Image (cartoon, coloured by chain):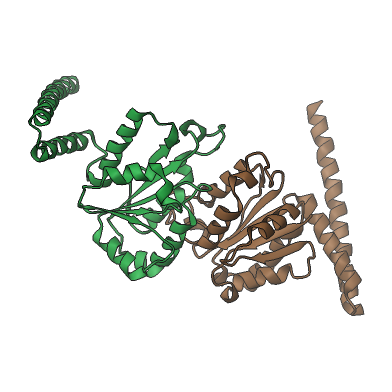
Chain colours: A brown, B green
Amino acid sequence: MKTLVIVAHPKLAESTTQQLLKQSIATYENVTWHPLTELIDVVQERQLLRQADRIIFQFPLYWYSAPALLKQWQDKVLTTKFATGSSFSLAHKELGLVVSTGSASKTFQPGAAEQFTMAEILRPYEALANKTHMKYLSPLVIYQFPYLTKIEQQRLYATYQQYAANSKFDHFAGQEEWINSQLKRKINTTKKAATQQSLQQIQAVLQSNEDTLADLAMTVEMMKQDEDD
Amino acid sequence: MKTLVIVAHPKLAESTTQQLLKQSIATYENVTWHPLTELIDVVQERQLLRQADRIIFQFPLYWYSAPALLKQWQDKVLTTKFATGSSFSLAHKELGLVVSTGSASKTFQPGAAEQFTMAEILRPYEALANKTHMKYLSPLVIYQFPYLTKIEQQRLYATYQQYAANSKFDHFAGQEEWINSQLKRKINTTKKAATQQSLQQIQAVLQSNEDTLADLAMTVEMMKQDEDD
């Protein structure tokens, strides 16, 4: 799976959020980090889009929408002829959103400060996916990055990796498979024998947990069948 | 009441919709027609905003949002410090939207082509009004302008006049009052005796209708009181 991350941030170099995200996918060959500038080469942009299976709009939320940088790109690159009409060049691709905001998660609901849910605020992007026949992925929203603890940052690091590179990030089995593949990769590339050994231990524990889970799932399945009889 | 109409249209001169709207308020001294360009003088923009009681964002819907031109303006002019924070410079002003779209009204609903209602799609602007303590007006949406009949265009012409200039456009009594004041104005400025006479006839008919309505309203009120007893 090839992913195109379209980053629209007017102060990209100063953003610690974006630095963390960029770093987390730095070694993933199938993920293209593509920061927008005001100069837009429409032909090249469309080529990048055509090559991608998953397209991510990544931006800080300014006035409940992307910065003008992304809107300008949308208005220029996604013409009716290219994105809908007879060609539907983006059809069957996935559209993901990675949105950062300075407001807390709990403020996005009726009766709270922001009044609307994030799902409602991001409707224009969902409508775009609908119109262009893309599959809309659940957005990855980063609330109040500066307040994240070290552990929460690490979790975001790993979640983002999957959002960008795991074709099956939205199922438990898909996440499991992904973690295993990442562990294997790490074991094969690491040079320190001690690190390798501890990674193999983690792998063994995960494998044992997976076996237990598979046994449990089978038992539950049998119980359900008994009920249905 | 002073109104500032912020027009964000990348091809303004070619838009027949915008020409009609502009013409309809051409003689209204308290309505400022303010088309945006890419050059934004932040100080001047804020001065215009401070002077206005009603602020209208007027634009064609591109990808379920305003053209980049307006987003750029929002990002530059409406800083947190100016629009929220300690100053709340827009508080208690009204925010109106005049939005044109090529899709039909009936397509904006669940199960139809656009999937979402226009109210949902315009949430980011409602959220902006909420955040800046402005009063959000019901948007004036112009669906498929090129398909409007001559009579529908005339109705839009008059509706838009009220949306831009009538402080009480959203109540029947306010609309009535407005139409009377517009008739008086026309009678006073017209030079042809024949026109003046027919306008006075219209005025008399309207007055008679108003009297009938007032009588009916009083009867209904009395009936309600009888029920309550």
From the viewer's side, name the closer residue of B70 and A7. Answer: B70
The structure residue drawn at horizontal position 80% and vertical position 50%, both measured from the top left corner, is A173
Q: Position of residue A153 (x, y in %)?
A: 65, 69
From the viewer's side, name the closer residue of A18 and B189. Answer: B189
Q: Is residue A200 left or right of residue A76?
A: right
Q: Position of residue A211 (x, y in %)?
A: 88, 53
Q: Position of residue B227 (x, y in %)?
A: 19, 20
Location of residue A141 (image quadrant): bottom right
What quarter of the picture does the C terminus of chain A occupy? top right
In the picture shown, does residue A35 fall above or below A220? below
Residue reaching furthest front?
A: B192
Location of residue B91 (image quadrant): bottom left
From the viewer's side, name the closer residue of B41 and A227. Answer: B41
From the viewer's side, name the closer residue of B72 and B111. Answer: B72
Q: Is residue A169 left or right of residue B117?
A: right
Q: How many numbered badges does the structure rendering display? A: 0
Q: Is residue B157 left or right of residue B131?
A: left
What quarter of the picture does the N terminus of chain A occupy? bottom right
The structure residue drawn at horizontal position 40% and vertical position 40%, both measured from the top left corner, is B141
Q: Position of residue B43 (x, y in %)?
A: 33, 70
Residue A163 seen anywhere in this rendered image of the structure: no
Location of residue B150 (image quadrant): top left
